[in-house]
Amino acid sequence: MLNNEPSMDKIDDYNGMESKEKRSTVNKIIIFCLLIGALLAGLKIAFNNPGDYVGTPQNPGINTAR
């Protein structure tokens, strides 16, 4: 009788048995994503300057720009 059912034991990465190359690749991807997220957060903080005008065209508010 053939047992062709997939099982966790047949997977190369099961139970901490992954290769060093695969572990290194996963770590590099995670670090890359964190760096891109930090870059985007920094850009949002640096270039997200709301206007000083408070109000709408229908209800003018206070203009704090001098």
Image (spheres, rainbow, N blue to C red):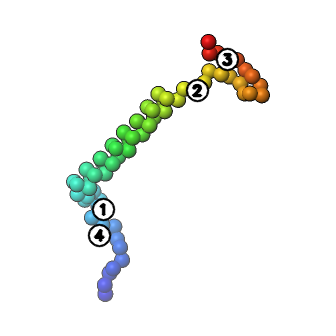
Amino acid tagged 2: Pro
Q: What is the C-alpha distance between the residues marked 4 and 1?
A: 8 Å
Local SS, label 2: loop
Q: What is the C-alpha distance between the residues marked 3 and 1?
A: 63 Å
Local SS, label 1: helix
Q: Are marks 3 and 1 in contact (CB under 8 Å)?
A: no
Where residue 23 appears, x then y in whole percent? 27, 52
Q: Label 2 belongs to which residue?
A: 50
Tell me which numbered mark, 3 or 1, is placed earlier along the sequence: 1
In terms of depth relative to the viewer, which is nearer, 12 or 28?
Answer: 28
State the mark number for residue 10.
Answer: 4
State the mark number for residue 63.
Answer: 3
Quadrant of residue 17 within the rendered picture: bottom left
Q: Are marks 4 and 3 in contact (CB under 8 Å)?
A: no
Q: Are marks 4 and 1 in contact (CB under 8 Å)?
A: yes
Tell me which numbered mark, 2 or 1, is placed earlier along the sequence: 1
